[in-house]
Amino acid sequence: ELKVEQNPLFLSMQEGKNYTIYCNYSTTSDRLYWYRQDPGKSLESLFVLLSNGAVKQEGRLMASLDTKARLSTLHITAAVHDLSATYFCAVVATQGGSEKLVFGKGTKLTVNP
Amino acid sequence: GAGVSQSPSNKVTEKGKDVELRCDPISGHTALYWYRQSLGQGLEFLIYFQGNSAPDKSGLPSDRFSAERTGGSVSTLTIQRTQQEDSAVYLCASSLVGTPETQYFGPGTRLLVL
């Protein structure tokens, strides 16, 4: 059974600082996603990572994937308050033609002025 | 274009009542998913529909939960004899078939069972 672990689960940081969120998963998968969720809102897709060594960047966020280590990172550069949200990684589990996303528990990020 | 829509946005019900939650996927998306997000928790897969194939119901927590998808579009998730532990946000997502396709999520239905 595919398991996805994120850490940290809670992250409080100051504006302007850098930090990394980690996502480990237990079995091989061909896709990994990062989503953002604001309070009371639904999930917004940030990145999809498909292959070993994949790196994607959008603004102050950069995601990478190491399929051999079964590890993805979401790096935050020079954080700003607007980045405050909960970030989820999710890995595709495929079985018998069916596929589903298995999510980590999320990292609640708070960026303080 | 229009995204995934869900209704109602909020539902308060009494324990033991049945509820129906509706999902309208993005037009043309053949895959549809239901997830549940309990307070402070991650998302839990419930059920997956793909075209005319038999749905993957492996995530449904009990036989009180059922879902159908009519005409390959709109889906309804039904919870019978609701229990307090069913209180959660129920999220629907849709996607095109084939890799790599992002799942696009609806706004969710917040269900509270009293």
Image (spheres, coloured by chain):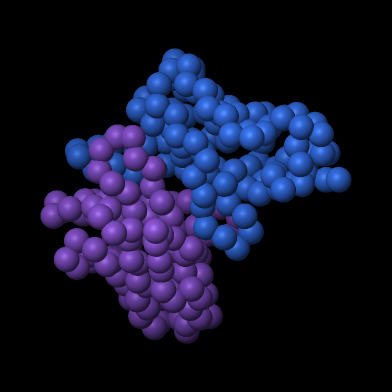
Chain colours: A blue, B purple
Q: Position of residue B71 (x, y in %)?
A: 17, 66
Q: Position of residue A62 (x, y in %)?
A: 60, 29
The residue lying furthest to the front in this view is: B1
Residue B103 vs A78, above or below: the answer is: below
Quarter of the picture holding the C terminus of chain A: top right
Q: Name the side, left or right, on which B104 lies relative to A34.
A: left
Viewer-closest of A82 and A32: A82
Q: Name the side, left or right, on which B9 lies relative to A29.
A: right
Residue B15 vs B62, above or below: the answer is: below
Viewer-closest of B43 and A32: A32
Q: Position of residue B24 (x, y in %)?
A: 33, 66
Q: Quadrant of residue A87?
A: top right
Q: Residue at 33%, 61% (x, y): give it.
A: B25
Q: Name the side, left or right, on which A107 lies relative to A27.
A: right
Q: Is residue A28 visible?
A: yes
Q: Residue at 43%, 17% (x, y): give it.
A: A52
Residue B22 vs A69, above or below: the answer is: below
Q: Residue at 40%, 21% (x, y): give it.
A: A51
Q: Position of residue B30 (x, y in %)?
A: 23, 52
